[in-house]
Amino acid sequence: MGWKEDQVAGFEVFLDDINDLKPLSEDIYYNHIPNELYAETIRQKFPGIFNWLDLQNINEVVILSLMVIVAIINMITALMILIFERTNMIGVLKSMGARNWGIRRIFLYYAAYIILNGLLWGNILGVSLCMLQKYFKLIRLDEENYYLSYAPIYLNPWTILALNVGTLLVTLLFLIIPSYLVSRINPVKAIRFD
């Protein structure tokens, strides 16, 4: 830009990938600048912001794990109630020659229907609330503590899809175990069961 050496206080280097931050900083420091100068990353310059972001990532994992555990427990309970309510039907199906896996599949399909229904309504509500925050900035933050004036929202359709598919698969996987209750039901006792 035609500046003299005493007119420049520093240079900024912008990266496409934050994972290149440390290696590029070391390369600049050791290979491209004189000894009396130093290279400092944005993470070194503003450690508070990055520590806060790292804490948010931990919170995300904890919250998602708790939500999946609650979903699994609720669905196991619902499946067991469905099986106990339909004991008479299970006995009739077994007496007519239905196999255990076929009957278990009926309950797993019904459980999948319940999960998909919950995911549909949960997504509609969750994405609607996120869109409201994204465009109207309803949730305000204290800038001294959070470095932001409002809670930012970033919606990635692939992440939402992956969370939905993951929740469905993990929950159904855990429902296979309680569905074994079907194989323990004796048809003669089940038909007389009221």
Image: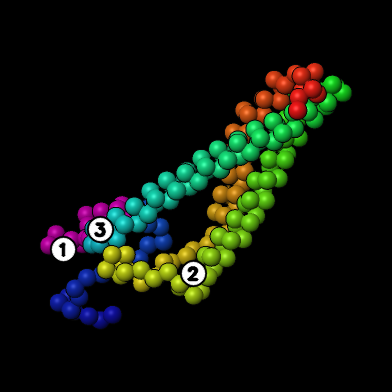
Report the side of 181 relative to 156 (left or right): right
Q: What's the magenta region?
A: 21-43
Asked if the residues shown at circle 3 and circle 1 are in contact, with their CB atoms under 8 angstroms apart, the answer is no
Dividing the picture into quadrants, the one containing residue 108 is top right
Q: Is residue 71 above or below residue 49?
A: above
| Placement of the C terminus among the 4 image quadrants | top right
Using the image as rendered, state which of residue 27 and residue 64 is in the foreground. Answer: 64
Question: In front: 87, or 58?
Answer: 87
Q: Residue furthest right?
A: 96
Viewer-proximal residue, 46 or 23? 46
Classify residue 186 as left or right of residue 47. Answer: right
Q: Residue at x 65, y 55 (%)?
A: 120
Q: Among all residues in the image, which is located at the extreme bottom?
A: 2
Distance between mark 1 and mark 2 Cα atoms? 44 Å
- The tag earlier along the polypeptide, 1 or 2, is 1
Name the residue that disc number 3 marks: 47
Q: Residues within 10 Å of mark 1 (few under 14, many from 20)?
A: few
Is residue 25 one of those drawn in magenta? yes
Tag 3 secondary structure: helix
- Looking at the rendered image, the quarter that the N terminus falls into is bottom left
Residue under label 1: 37
- The answer for how far apart the CA atoms under marks 3 and 1 are is 21 Å
Image depth: mark 2 or mark 3 in front: 2
Front residue (pair 164, 124): 124
Q: Is 139 rendered above or below residue 78?
A: below
Residue type highlighted by circle 2: Gln
